[in-house]
Image: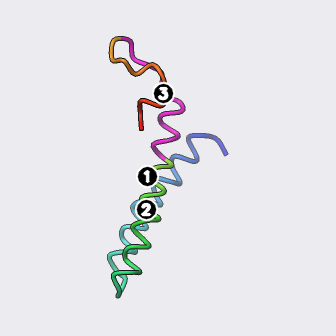
């Protein structure tokens, strides 16, 4: 799967899991949906940081600074 397709799927999963979590009856079920959404958000961040180019002058020359 290419980065664009992964980013599209993961970003859609964020919204869908937040919506699903808000419809859950118990706080544990809600929390689990929100944890899944957070995992998708971290996946988006990783795709974006992997493909990002450093911007001179900002001190962000290595991807470990993005975390």
Along the line of sight, the residue nearer the viewer: 7 or 46:
46
Question: Secondary structure beneath disc 3?
Answer: loop
Which residue is disc 3 drawn over? Answer: 52
Instruction: Give above or below for 3 relative to 62.
Output: below
Query: What secondary structure characterizes most of the magenta part?
Result: helix
Chain-order first, disc 2 or disc 3? 2
Q: Position of residue 16 (x, y in %)?
A: 42, 66
Residue at image position (48%, 36%) is 48
Mark 3 crowd level (few <14, some 14–19, many ≥20, 10 Å Cα): few
Q: Which residue is drawn at 43% across and 52% down?
A: 41
- In the image, 25: left or right of 39? left
Magenta-colored span? 44-56
- Relative to residue 60, is residue 14 depicted above or below? below
User: Dot 1, crowdedness within 10 Å: few (<14), some or many (≥20)?
Assistant: some
> Which label's residue is closer to the chain start, 1 or 3?
1
Question: Disc 1 designates what residue?
Answer: 41
User: Residue 45: where, in percent of width, then height?
Assistant: 45, 42
Dots 1, 2 in contact, CB < 8 A: yes
Magenta-drawn stretch contains 53? yes
Give the quarter of the image for residue 61.
Answer: top left
- Against 12, residue 28 (above or below) is below
Total marks placed: 3
The C terminus: image quadrant: top left
- Residue 21 position by quadrant: bottom left
Q: Mark 2 points at which residue?
A: 37
Give the camera-side residue of 7 and 40.
40
CB under 8 Å between callouts 1 and 3?
no
Mark carried by residue 14? none
């Amino acid at each position: 799967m290419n980065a664009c397709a992964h980013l599209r799927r993961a970003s859609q999963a964020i919204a869908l899991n937040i919506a699903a979590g808000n419809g859950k009856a118990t706080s544990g079920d809600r929390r689990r949906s929100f944890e899944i959404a957070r995992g998708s958000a971290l996946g988006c961040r990783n795709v974006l940081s992997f493909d990002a180019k450093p911007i001179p002058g900002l001190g962000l020359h290595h991807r470990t600074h993005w975390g």
